Image (cartoon, coloured by chain):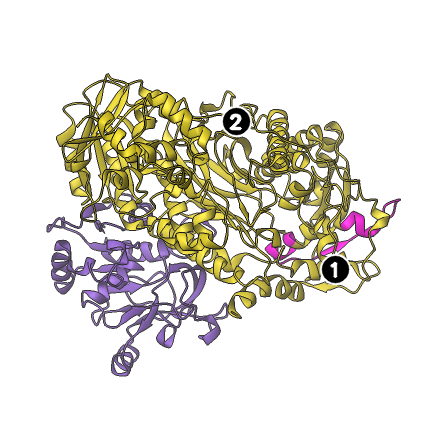
Chain colours: A yellow, B purple
Amino acid sequence: MSIAARAARAADSITPELVAEHGLSPEEYELLVGSLGREPSLTELGIFSVMWSEHCSYKSSKVWLKKLPTEGPQVIQGPGENAGVVDIGDGQATAFKMESHNHPSFIEPYQGAATGVGGIMRDVFTMGARPIANMNALRFGAPDHAKTRHLLAGVVSGIGDYGNCMGVPTVGGETNFDPRYNDNILVNAMTVGLVDANRIFKSAAKGVGHPVVYVGSKTGRDGIHGATMASAEFDEASEEKRPTVQVGDPFTEKLLLEACLELMAEDAIVGIQDMGAAGLTSSSVEMADKGGVGIELELDRVPTREEGMTAYEMMLSESQERMLMVLQPGSEKAAERVFRKWELDFSIIGYTTDTGHLVVRHRGIVEADIPLAALAHAAPVYERPYTKREPQPIVAPEDVPAPNSLLGALEYLMGSPHLCSRSWIWEQYDHMVMADTVQRPGGDAAVVRVHGTQKGIAISCDVTPRYCAADPYEGAKQAVAECWRNLTAVGADPLAITDCMNFGNPERPEIMGEFASAVEGMAEACTALAFPVVSGNVSLYNETNGIAIPPTPAIGGVGLLPDIAAMATIALKREGDLLMLLGAEAGHLGQSLFMEVVSGETRGAPPPVDLDAERRTGDLVRGLIRSLCLSAAHDVSDGGLLVAIAEMALAGRLGVALDSVSGPLPAHALWFGEDQARYVVAASPDKADAIHKAAAVAKVPLRLLGKVGGDAIVLAGEAPLSLATLKAAHEHWLPRFMAHG
Amino acid sequence: MKASVIVFPGSNCDRDAAVALEAATGQPPAMVWHGDSAIPASDLIVLPGGFSYGDYLRSGAMAAHSPVMREVVARARAGTPVLGICNGFQVLTEAGLLPGVLMRNATLKFICRDVTLRVERSDSIFTRRYTAGEVVCFAIAHKDGSYFADAATLGRLEGEGLVAFRYCDAQGSVTPEANPNGSAHNIAGIYNETGRVLGLMPHPERLADPALSGTDGAKMFLSLVEALH
């Protein structure tokens, strides 16, 4: 029976309800029938549904993503491949990407987070890069929400177990608690890899008659329709979707990593693509489409974990730890030998063709025959209507009540869920394996040494959701600027970013407006800071029962230190050093943590970001670090100046004596305001002149804050806050919270 | 000193061990694949950290039965020094070269951080560059590191001076607070009866480089070079 005849027979069973269950609107189904020229078979319906899902097609976000800058002299590979790649000199490059695994992690936190980590590492080693560092950006609900503890424990354990087993250090990240994530947590995972610039692998399947090879784990029924799930809103019934969450096997992935890198050292691979979302379907379609060829698959040759799997199930399975490769003809035996050595499945499941079609055969029957152009390019692209938010008024510092005690407020802030130590989290991650982690979690950016060299790669993940919720445009600008600042604060040249755009339902104009504003804010900051976007991921429909998360454009940035000998850390190092603030002070308290935690209110505009000031101040600080003028540096962000100083003191186990301040601004606005483009630096007194001169040349305001020494934070007119008290406040909250389940 | 590092599927500190060995000896060690039954002539065999066979079944249990381990056991019995780090320690206990077992940490969580250890003896081939009672800083990174043995075995280990390292505080006091994983007697590492096989959970190879916030681990490799040159 021909596919058309089979499809005609199936057409009766393809009801509007079935189409809706596949996440396709009636209009999209019409488009499908039109581009296929007939009704689809069930397998074809499944294939279209995943390829046209929001997750795979970016149909709502595409028109906006084009506005992001993606180029620069350092960029070797921009968006469109499995990961972005940037030049780090000496013929070396770094490949990196961040990706979301939000919905699966809410349903099944351990496996959801673990497979998120597995997926992003696969994206990076698919490019030929050895993963050298992982990071993550996590958003949980309010601490007092019934599920928060369970979700946090499961996510952290899942991330840890996967990365630890792989032997790739998880070097840091960020974690927020906010009631707006109560029913829709965010788990964004980032991997950074190292690759020789002339050995980068891509996904295009060039050439006709080349073998298509399946390697890795066997295919099971897990994760069928994961991509469709990631493209729908949540409700109570969603938790019944647990079977669509995949199960991770980091041991197999470790073998897959080593086998792939071993084969990549030879000239056997034409194109390679990992089977992530939408599994065999999206990997085969993307490879063939990019190479401008057709592809034929014999599903009887796919290694399966279960008996009696249908073509529909095999094409849609999201079983983990699998790769699809197109090989040079004649290299099959050599490739098979490598994968057998690593005890992995290896099967030639098809060939490239010149038909421009995806043809799927199973048990002698053509189950699908689809023009690739229809799958890859005929997908709908929406210019969804959007409404932008009215900016909120700027809060005058005088309108925020002063605390009874500045240092009392500091202690309270440092012990709050927002600012307390995250060591309970990162101690569950092996952050030292590979023996190149030269800056561990807890600083502004993590730094991993490029193995065998003195170069360092700095990595940071940033976004401040409360700013984005108040003003998506300024918030997104701030996220990019803070990431750039964190990389700068360790002495790195910021190179490029990856992004994870987490938003609500784009079919609602106000959500689409948030997305549009955030893209515009990011684009402006990326352009001003020469910090292009080279890879990323969009996660929409992050809502439950119609309540959306705050707009959360998570930014993962990578920078380069030419020599780790000139690397700064936040820890104070020497008694007698001077502490200085670089950057302008306006005492901006709107949307500050002080306001939220101490005053108990969230209102007003977030701090504005002056990108010119960012650039000047950052370039100044980096120059001072490179010329070895500074003994410590720290960017000022959440919690403001006094929090930054306290973090430096705790890290260095050295106190500070702060000079009192005078001027028009209230003291609490100076110490807790979250003005951007600022750094606290420490230096020995003999460097002070040079620093003053450099700041004057760069037109960056400098204020002497005080002197390093003692074992307390001392501020005139206040009882000293001992480091022991501060440390206890800072370290107790998270372990206690997690212990008292 | 010629060293061999055994590589199991899932080993992931094999490179770290090789780097530390090369820094101490001036030559790269031989990397021996688990499926090989031959190990080149070696003055030292290292079983590295990682997750051999995914730690499935039980940490180290499957690696203990891989082909190469028969040869490791034979060499150890013939007097070749063997160093098992983290997963390598687990393999050594599963292979019967060291007594006891490494159980899940008392916290039930993976723990990665620097710890302070008391060096119990300085007369072994692994510790001659340290002094007895010295407090050193190594890193731990494990989920199954809680050392357990029956009372008779613990009595024998203590009586014969076979405890190599104990978790302690910065002053060298062996306290419950300084015990990160619930190990019996705060044991972090033990010798076999000849003192030529050492298994320990902490990673000396991770703090053996001035760029990595400590170099206390390097002295173990330098001790071996001195003893086995």
**How many residues crowd around disc 2 within 10 Å: few (fewer than 14), some, or many (20 or more)?**
some
User: Pointer 2: what residue?
Assistant: A382
User: Pointer 1: what residue?
Assistant: A409
Bounds of the magenta span? A647-671
Dot 2 lies on which element?
loop
Question: Could you tell me which residue is drawn at 14 percent across and 32 percent down?
Answer: A364
Q: Is residue A386 above or below residue A289?
A: below
Whole-number angstrom distance, CA of label 1 to CA of label 2: 48 Å
Dot 1 lies on which element?
helix
Q: Are marks 1 and 2 in contact (CB under 8 Å)?
A: no
Question: Could you tell me which residue is drawn at 73 percent across and 40 percent down?
Answer: A607
Q: Chain of mark 2?
A: A
Q: Which residue appears farthest toward the right when viewing the image?
A: A664
Q: Which residue appears farthest toward the front when viewing the image?
A: A12
**Which image quarter: residue A107?**
bottom left
Any part of residue A245 in sight: yes
